[in-house]
Amino acid sequence: MPIRVRLNVVLAERNVKSKDLAEYVGITEANLSLLKQGKVKGIRFDTLERICDYLDCQPGDLLRFERLSE
Amino acid sequence: MPIRVRLNVVLAERNVKSKDLAEYVGITEANLSLLKQGKVKGIRFDTLERICDYLDCQPGDLLRFERLSE
DNA sequence: AATTAATTATTGTAAAACGATAATTTCTTT
DNA sequence: AAAGAAATTATCGTTTTACAATAATTAATT
């Protein structure tokens, strides 16, 4: 699955707790955990938006397309 | 809605026809059109992936978080 | 050892991505 | 101006899945 979710990386960089982000975004810690680990198959823009807002980042920081070959 | 979908921009830059992209991605032109215009509320990663693949771009090229103020 | 933080698991539901199709509109090209 | 191609809009239906809610388990911190 070449779309890589690197929310975990950004969280670590920012030193932000999942709990705090979840609270701000308005989703459960359980779901945020799944998202962090790339265990979801998509994302709603309003969720992405609030994450970017809180982490002061861009979607491109959270999502990367990684080609298989090369 | 501060997540801006700029697929239309990238398509224009690449001079790619919606029809061709739709065909490659495997979604209907109708749905691609909605996506192009930011009229969807989310996206599945497998769709995003194929778009990035065909357009040789990153999610960050297609999605931008734009703050309201400032 | 306690407390806190994060992950995993389960079940349920509502939202919406997407299909299929067709009609309308816009854009090209002759 | 016609014709053709490309794109948008509109309906309706279906299936997927993001998310909630909750609880239990497993890391980390202190």
Image: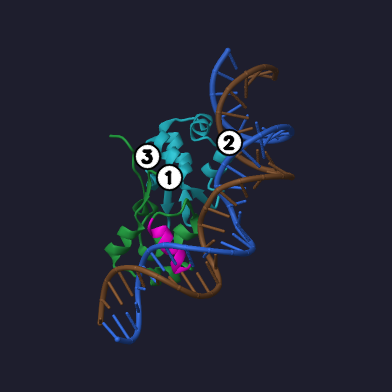
Chain colours: A green, B cyan, C blue, D brown
Percent position (x, y) of residue B70? 40, 62
> Chain ID for label 1?
B
Dots 3 and 1: beta carbons under 8 Å? yes
Tag shown at residue A59: none
Give, as a single range, the part of the protein colored magenta.
Answer: A28-37
Q: Residue at x 54, y 30 (%)?
A: B19
What residue is shown with label 3? B57
Q: Is residue A3 left or right of residue B42?
A: left
* Element class at badge 3: loop
Q: CA distance from mark 2 to mark 1?
A: 19 Å
- Label located before the other in sequence (3 or 1): 3
Q: Can you give x and y, in whole percent of width and height, for residue B58 in the image? A: 37, 43
Please tell me which residue is depicted at 40% across the width and 44% down the height of the picture: A1
Instruction: From the image, tell me which residue sits under label 1.
Output: B62
Q: Position of residue C16 (x, y in %)?
A: 58, 52
Specify the subunit that label 2 lies on.
Answer: B
The residue where tag 2 is placed is B28
| Labels 2 and 3 positioned on one and the same chain | yes
Which amino acid does the dot numbered 2 rest on? Thr
